[in-house]
Image (tube, grey):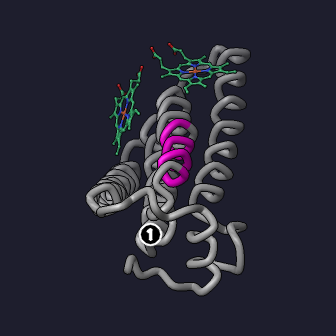
């Protein structure tokens, strides 16, 4: 994390979300034009886990700014997105040459599940804290500035 909110988690999540959105829309348009729906599951999961979920993660990190001070928020970000890339890769392969798809689908799904457990744990931790809303965005920014991730 750097000296201001540039690399804050809500910003990272909304940036990756719009990339997933653009990619999902492009694929949807291609599917519509070509009448080739072989990758429908890629379209569905790329949009719902990429665009919809990541945009929600961005909003949740904004609504509960303490989340942004957690080191594990970054772990969640990476596991979710890498897991999703693996899941989509598995779905692409599955529809063409089934033999190699298993490991991608398996590892991708488990990675997404681990990411989900971390996110769930982070939200519970932060929302259980007393005086949750006493931490302003400015204070979060200050914490990031000092690369200090403690919740004290
Ligand atoms: C320009 C925008 C879009 C286009 C052209 C498009 C196109 C398509 C096409 C061609 C299908 C396949 C339908 C089928 O095989 O039965 C589909 C399915 C689907 N799309 Fe999109 N899509 C777009 C945007 C979105 C967005 C933004 C989302 C979600 C946030 C979304 C979610 C879904 C879902 C859930 C399905 C599966 C529905 C089902 O099978 O009943 N799509 N889309
Ligand atoms: C690790 C996570 C996930 C895995 C492994 C997974 C896997 C699957 C599988 C195997 C199918 C059936 C595909 C088929 O009929 O060929 C499916 C369908 C579907 N999933 Fe997921 N899914 C996951 C997460 C999600 C999430 C989080 C959402 C929504 C936010 C979602 C929305 C859907 C929808 C809408 C369909 C139906 C698409 C259609 O119309 O065919 N999935 N998923």
Q: Is residue 41 left or right of residue 115?
A: right
Q: Is residue 117 above or below residue 33?
A: below
Say which quarter of the image contains residue 3: bottom right
Tell me where residue 25 appears, x and y as whole percent. 68, 29
Would residue 55 be counted in the magenta stretch?
yes
Residue occupying the point 63% across, 59% down? 12
Which residue is nearer to you in this view: 133 or 147?
133
Say which quarter of the image contains residue 73: bottom left
Would residue 8 be counted in the magenta stretch?
no
* Magenta part, dominant SS: helix
Figure quadrant of the N terminus: bottom right
Residue at the disc numbered 1: 75
Say which quarter of the image contains residue 124: bottom left
Tell me where residue 128 appears, x and y as whole percent. 26, 58
Residue occupying the point 49% across, 64% down? 135
Neighbour tally class for label 1: few under 14, some 14-19, many 20 plus, Cα within 10 Å? some
Tell me where residue 37 appears, x and y as whole percent. 56, 21
Residue occupying the point 68% across, 51% down? 15
Q: Quarter for ligand 2?
A: top left
Looking at the rendering, the stretch of residues picked out in magenta corresponds to 52-62
Q: Is residue 61 above or below residue 130?
A: above
Which residue is nearer to you in this view: 136 or 89?
136
Q: Is residue 52 visible?
A: yes
Q: Is residue 82 left or right of residue 3?
A: left
Q: Is residue 2 left or right of residue 90?
A: right
Tell me where residue 68 appears, x and y as whole percent. 51, 65
């Amino acid at each position: 994390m750097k000296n201001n909110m540039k690399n804050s988690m809500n910003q990272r999540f909304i940036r990756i979300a719009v990339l997933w959105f653009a990619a999902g829309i492009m694929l949807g348009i291609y599917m519509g034009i070509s009448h080739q729906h072989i990758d429908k599951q890629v379209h569905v999961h790329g949009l719902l886990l990429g665009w919809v979920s990541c945009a929600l993660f961005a909003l949740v990190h904004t609504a509960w700014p303490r989340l942004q001070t957690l080191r594990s928020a970054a772990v969640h970000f990476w596991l979710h997105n890498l897991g999703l890339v693996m899941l989509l890769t598995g779905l692409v392969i599955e529809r063409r040459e089934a033999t190699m798809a298993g490991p991608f689908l398996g590892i991708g799904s488990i990675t997404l599940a681990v990411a989900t457990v971390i996110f769930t744990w982070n939200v519970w931790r932060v929302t259980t804290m007393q005086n949750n809303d006493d931490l302003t965005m400015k204070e979060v920014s200050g914490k990031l500035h000092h690369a200090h991730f403690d919740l004290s």
